[in-house]
């Protein structure tokens, strides 16, 4: 019985494990435009990012880190950093591409 309980606990922990907290650096964008906001015809880019997210619940704030884009779990704080380079501390859920945000700050 003790062994079965340990196996169940170990299985449950492994399902929830997403990895260690780490730092990501990139630009706050939206999942509609990604790297390029020109096609929307809305300037500056920060205004485009905010309007795209407000336009539909389908579009989310995201971090553009090179060629990779990660959706952010926090959908309120990124608004103040729209189109800015930031440093995000958090846990990446590889399967979903979502960063569970712990902290967002301007990148130096």
Image: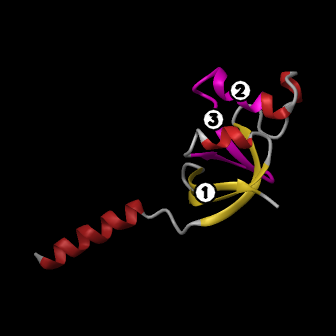
Is 6 on the left or on the right of 11, as rendered? left
Secondary structure category for the residue under label 2: helix
Q: What whole-number distance in Å separates the C-alpha atoms at marks 2 and 1?
A: 23 Å
Find residue 102 and report its image quarter: bottom right
The residue singled out by tag 2 in the image is 52
Q: Secondary structure at mark 3?
A: loop
State the residue at coordinates (24%, 67%). Answer: 8
- Report which residue position mark 1 lands on: 103
Viewer-nearest residue: 45 or 35: 45
The Cα–Cα distance between marks 3 and 2, rounded to whole angstroms, is: 8 Å
Quadrant location of the N terminus? Answer: bottom left
* Magenta-drawn segment: 48-72
Q: Is residue 51 magenta?
A: yes
Q: Where the C terminus falls, by quadrant?
A: bottom right
In the rendered image, residue 37, in percent from the top left (x then y), is placed at 84, 31
Can you give x and y, in whole percent of width and height, for residue 40 in the image? 83, 23
Q: Position of residue 52 (x, y in %)?
A: 71, 26
Pick out the residue farthest to the bottom.
3
Q: Is residue 21 above or below residue 6?
A: above
Residue at 31 percent across and 71 percent down: it is 10
Label 1 or label 3, whichever comes before in sequence order: 3
Q: Residues within 10 Å of mark 3 (few under 14, many from 20)?
A: many
Q: Are marks 1 and 3 in contact (CB under 8 Å)?
A: no
Image mark for residue 60: 3
For marks 3 and 2, the one nearer the N-term is 2
């Amino acid at each position: 019985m003790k062994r079965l309980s340990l196996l169940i606990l170990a299985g449950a922990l492994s399902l929830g494990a997403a990895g260690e907290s780490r730092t990501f650096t990139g630009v706050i964008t939206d999942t509609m435009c990604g790297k390029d906001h020109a096609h929307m015809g809305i300037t500056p880019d920060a205004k485009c990012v905010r309007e795209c997210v407000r336009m539909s619940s389908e579009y989310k704030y995201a971090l553009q880190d090179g060629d990779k884009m990660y959706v952010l779990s926090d959908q309120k704080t990124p608004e103040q950093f729209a189109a800015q380079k930031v440093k995000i501390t958090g846990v990446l859920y590889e399967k979903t591409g979502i960063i569970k945000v712990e902290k967002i700050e301007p990148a130096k």
